[in-house]
Image (spheres, rainbow, N blue to C red):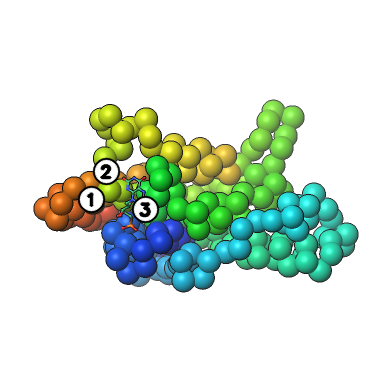
Amino acid sequence: MSSILLVRGSTRGNDSVSGKVAKALAEGLAAGGTIVERDLVATPLPHIGTDFSSAIRLASEDRTPAQAEAIAISDKEVDELLAADTLVISSGFVNFGITSILKSWIDHIARAGRTFRYTENGPEGLVQGKKAYIVLASGGVYSSGPAAALDFAEPYLRSVLGFIGIKDVQVIRVEGIAMGPEAAEKAIAGALAQASELAKAA
Ligand SMILES: Cc1cc2nc3c(=O)[nH]c(=O)nc-3n(C[C@H](O)[C@H](O)[C@H](O)COP(=O)(O)O)c2cc1C
C-alpha cells in the first residue's frame, strides 16, 4: 500500500493517452492505498509572477497579502508532493517539451528551503526517499531515431526531479500517436503492459 500523487499534465482531458496510462499505473502502484489526483487542466495553476518571484526571498512576516497568497498557492502543491510516497506525472509532448500547465506546477514545487536548499557544496534536493514515474505521450518518436535530439521533455523532467532529490525515476513512453490508428493502439497497449510490469515490480 502506498500513497500516490498523480499529476495529470496533459491538455487533452479525457482523450489523453498519457493520462490513461498514468492512471492505470497509479492504481497498480497504490495497491489499495491512496491516490491524490492533481488534474492541472481541470484546475490550472497561475503562472508564477512578480508576487511569487519577490516573495520567495522574503520572510513570511514581510510579505504583502498578494505575495502571501502567491506563496500559499505554491505551498499547497509542495505539501501535496511531500505527503506522497510516489509521484506519477503524465504529459503529452507540446512543441518538443512538456505542457505549460505541467511547467507551471514545476515552477510552484521547486522551492528553495522546501524542496531544495543551497549548501556550501552546491544545491541539495530535500525531497528524499521518493520514487517517480513519468508517462510521456507524443505524436512522433523521440526515444530513439532522428528526433531524439528534439526531446526536451524527458531530460528536463529527469533534471528537475533530480534537482529536488528524486533520482529514482522510471519513464514510460507512448510514442507515435500521430502515426495512424494501428501505431497508436500498439503504443498504448505497450505502455499499459509496461505500467503493469512496473506496478508489479514496485
Ligand atoms: C498543441 C500541440 C502541440 C504538439 N506538439 C507535438 C510535438 O512537438 N511533438 C510530437 O510528437 N507531438 C506533438 N503533439 C501531439 C501530442 O503529443 C499527442 O497528441 C499526444 O498524444 C499528447 O499526449 P496526451 O494524449 O497525453 O494528451 C502536439 C499536440 C498538440 C495539441
Q: Are there few (<14), some (14-19), or many (20+) residues within 10 Å of tag 1?
A: few
Q: Residue at x 57, y 64 (%)?
A: 45
Q: Is residue 159 above or below residue 107?
A: above
User: Which sits earlier in the primary sequence, circle 2 or circle 1?
Assistant: 2
Residue position marked by numbered label 3 in the rendering = 92
Query: Do callouts 1 and 3 mark residues in contact (Cβ within 8 Å)?
Result: no
Q: Is residue 155 visible?
A: yes
> In the image, is 136 to the left or to the right of 69?
left
Residue position marked by numbered label 2 in the rendering = 140
Q: CA distance from mark 2 to mark 1?
A: 6 Å
Ligand 1 within 8 Å of disc 3? The answer is yes
User: Which sits earlier in the primary sequence, circle 3 or circle 2?
Assistant: 3
Q: Is residue 154 visible?
A: no
Q: Residue at x 50, y 58 (%)?
A: 101
Q: CA distance from mark 1 to mark 3?
A: 12 Å
Q: Position of residue 186 (x, y in %)?
A: 14, 51
Q: Residue flagged by tag 3: what amino acid is it?
A: Gly
Q: CA distance from mark 3 to mark 2?
A: 11 Å
Front residue of this view, candidates 29 and 104: 104
Ligand 1 within 8 Å of disc 2? The answer is yes
Q: Position of residue 7 (x, y in %)?
A: 45, 60
Q: Residue at x 37, y 30 (%)?
A: 149
Front residue of this view, candidates 173 and 84: 173
User: Which sits earlier in the primary sequence, circle 1 or circle 3?
Assistant: 3
Residue position marked by numbered label 1 in the rendering = 178
Name the quadrant of the N terminus.
Answer: bottom left
Secondary structure type for disc 1 = loop
